[in-house]
Amino acid sequence: MNPFFKKILKGYIIIILVYFLFLVILTNNYFKKQILQIYISNLKNTCYSASLPITEFLLTKNYLKLNEFINSLKNNLQIRTTIVSPDGIVLFDSHYDKTKMENHSNRAEIIDAKTKGFGYSVRYSSTLRKEMLYVAIPLKDKNDNTFAVLRTSYSIDELYKSINKFIYRILTITFFVCILVLLFSVFLSSYFTKPIEKLINSIKKLSNIELNKKTSFSTTDEFSFLEGSFNEMVEKIGILLSDISFQRDKLKNIFNSLQEAVALINKEGKIVLYNKSFEKLCKITPIENKLYCEVMLSYKFDEIIKKAFSEKKNLTEELNIEEKTYLVSCSSVSEEEIIVLLYDITSYKQLQRIKKEFVSDIVHELKTPLTSIKGFLETLYEEINEPQQKRYIEIAIFNTNRLINIVNDLATLSYLEKLEEEKNLSEVEFEDVNIYVILDVIKNLFETKAKQKNLDFIIDVKTEIKPIKADRFKIEQSLANLVDNAIRYTEKGYVKIKVEQDQFETKIIVEDTGIGIPKEYHKRIFERFFVVDKARSKKTGGTGLGLAIVKHIVNLHRGKIFVESSPNSGSKFIVILPNTPKIS
């Protein structure tokens, strides 16, 4: 007997048992209630029929006739009759000595009869020692006053016995019907489960990749349709598996041909998937299902993986392995796995180093000659009187100053880049910096320059600004670069410095009404030598390095800088500095 057949059969048995139990409870309660109501109605009718002669006998005090009438009810109808006074004293009883009976004023049927005109109750009679049904009505005189209560009662023990016999017969018939239904259910279950059992066996074969074997149910109903659909599905699965196998091999070849090292690592630290490039980096082979810390003997790599799992976000960091430098990129594939890519950036880092050394050498080699050239040009300018020649020397001095500014800015930028790359903050002098003092310095430096262009120079500080931890000189330098740019690229309107502060950050906003910056350049303007308007930059003496310097100063302070601008709508440079940066 297969499990599926057992489940169906068990279901049928449970349904039949529940139905049988429900029928027992429902039949028992229903018949008892219905037959009890019939007996209540009969006793009620008997009460009303007997009330007229009993009332007459009581009012005329014809107790002989009364006894005869009550005894006739007892003998003919097996009904017990009791007459009770309004105060509960038993006046007559057909089955028991009235003098030995209790006061009936607290009986439910007596109370209801006096108050509602009719009452009944079912309870155990301590007098007769059996379960009784009591029905009572009031007896009234000609003035409609209740002078007694007539109560009839009937033993319901016999009633219940009759009901139980009737119910027993019904349940016996029902039981045999249930047995027949159960036998039919066994047959029906077997009929339906045999094709399903065949289907299960076919699915087991399918799981064993036996795709060439087809299923036959030998039926002409819905199972024949299922047979055809299943065999068609098996055929399609075979085609799909072949295609998947081909694609898998293709992806595996591509995966292994990647120069970048790739590995899939689960939460337990095991290497689930990897390519040949990753395997070459490992000290131990084979590496499948081994812990990454066993095969990659790098403390920094261990830190990166743990950080990627804990932060659950994309992570990119540099990693040195022997003499090579790799850019490690971690991305979450799921809650349990991350994919790790290692890009070899050794050549790029060497180029960067060569570029920095070249810039450093250029700065060193050009600084002294340019200073000398400027000195000689200024001396020559003083000694020459001819206006045309003076004009030529002025142009030479202007361009020499521009070259000197570029060299100085390059030196500053190289210095800042070195600090940022090495994360060396020992040369950044963090101290309590009063923003108001810096604003006064900037005002003294640029207010006159702004007035020369008929620009309003505005400092807007509406709330109290507390000192922050920063390098005062570098913050002054970055703010000076931003204000200098704002004045240089603004022809009319104003240049405004606005400062806001909350519990954690200080926001410095340099706003102008100048030419603005197209949105596509918002990120590039912080690159070295990038200028939006090259002609204006040459004319005004800009080096294209000012914003790059500002960006690196802000980064050293663990801050952020961004721009809000559009053409002909001015620009707004926003610098956000932490009040107390994390410098460890």
Image: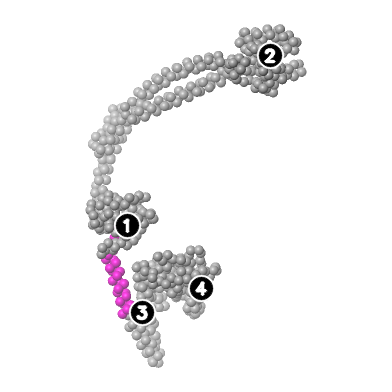
For badge 3, the amino acid type reads: Leu
> Residue 352's image quarter?
bottom left
For badge 2, the amino acid type reads: Thr
What residue is shown at x 25% (from left), y 58% (from top)?
281
Badge 4 element: helix
Residue 206 place in picture, x, y as percent: 27, 37
> Residue 69's image quarter?
top right
Which of 64 and 264 lies nearest the eye of the viewer?
64
For badge 1, the amino acid type reads: Asp
Residue 288 seen: yes
**Mark 4 or 1: the one toward you:** 1
Bin the neighbour count of mark 3 within 10 Å (Cα to Cα): few under 14, some 14-19, many 20 and up. some
- The residue wearing badge 4 is 436
Residues at marks 2 and 1, CA–CA distance in whole angstroms: 104 Å
Q: Residue furthest front?
A: 100
Q: Main secondary structure of the magenta part?
A: helix
Label annotation for residue 403? 3
**Mark 3 or 2: the one toward you:** 2
- The residue wearing badge 2 is 99
- The residue wearing badge 1 is 302
Badge 3 element: helix
Bin the neighbour count of mark 2 within 10 Å (Cα to Cα): few under 14, some 14-19, many 20 and up. few
Indicate whether 448 appears above or below 323: below
Question: Which mark is first along the chain, 1 or 4?
Answer: 1
**Mark 2 or 1: the one toward you:** 2
Badge 2 element: helix
Question: Which mark is first along the chain, 4 or 3?
Answer: 3
Residues at marks 3 and 2, CA–CA distance in whole angstroms: 137 Å
Q: State yes or no: residue 11 in magenta.
A: no
Residue 72 place in picture, x, y as percent: 65, 8
